[in-house]
Amino acid sequence: MSAFVVEIVLVVATLGFRALGALGVRRFATWPASAAHGMAVMLVVTAAAHFVPAGVTVMPNHADLVRMVPPIVPFPGAVVYATGVLELLGAVGLVVAATRRAAGISLAALYVLLLPANVYAAVADVPFGGGEATPLWIRIPEQILYITVALWAAGSADTILARRARTSPRSRAGSSEPALR
C-alpha cells in the first residue's frame, strides 16, 4: 500500500459511518463513535498484512513487517503475528461500546510501542509493500493520528454507556415510567 492509503481508509470509513448516523443510525450518531468504527475498519485492513504470505506483492505482507522490526527485538516473526492479533482484537473492542474505552486506550499504547519500529524502518530505509521506505516525516504524524483517534474513540465510550444506562429498563425499575421496548 502506498503512503496515505491507510489514512484514506480511516477517513472514508469514518465519513461513511457518520453519514449513516446522519441518516438516523443511532450507533453512528457522533463523530467519535463513527471514528471508532472507522478505525476498526482500518485495523482490519492493516492487520491483514501481518498474515499475508511473502509471495503476495499487491499489498504489504508479513515479510515486509518483519523487516521493520528493530534487530534488538527477539522473534520478529512472532511479534508481527502478535501485533496483527492485537490489531484485530482492538478492532473488535472498538465496535463494542462496553469495551471501546479499554480498546482505545490499549490501541493508543500499542501505537506508542510500535513507534520504534516505524522509526527504525524509516532510518534504516526499509522498503515497504514493494515500494520505497516511508520517510520518518510521514511515519510519526501517522502514529500521532492513530493515537489521537484511538483516544478520541475511547472517550466516546463514556457518553455511550451513560446514555444507555439512562435509557435501560433497569435504570427505570424504581420509576413510574414504562420501560421502552
Image (cartoon, rainbow, N blue to C red):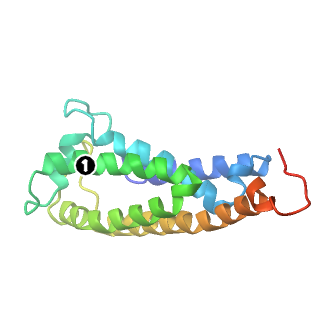
**Where residue 159 sits in the image (x, y, percent)?**
66, 66
Q: Name the residue under label 1.
A: 82
Q: Which residue type carries mark 1?
A: Ala
Residue under the point 31% across and 41% down: 49
In the foreground, 128 or 25: 25
* Residue 6 visible to the viewer: yes
**Where residue 137 sits in the image (x, y, percent)?**
33, 69
In the foreground, 175 or 62: 175
In the rendered image, the quadrant that contains the N terminus is top left
In the rendered image, the quadrant that contains the C terminus is top right
**Where residue 105 sits in the image (x, y, percent)?**
44, 66
Callout 1: helix, strand or loop? Answer: helix
* Residue 5 visible to the viewer: no
Residue under the point 91% across and 58% down: 177
Residue 158 lies in quadrant:
bottom right
The residue lying furthest to the front in this view is: 174
Residue 147 lies in quadrant:
bottom left
Left or right of 167, for residue 145: left
Residue under the point 22% across and 32% down: 53
**Where residue 173 sits in the image (x, y, percent)?**
80, 58
The residue lying furthest to the top in this view is: 55
Check disc 1: other Cα within 10 Å, few if <14, some if 14-19, many if 20+.
Answer: some
Q: How many labels does the image show?
A: 1
Left or right of 68, for residue 153: right
Left or right of 125, for residue 40: right
Residue under the point 45% across and 59% down: 103
In the foreground, 179 or 78: 179
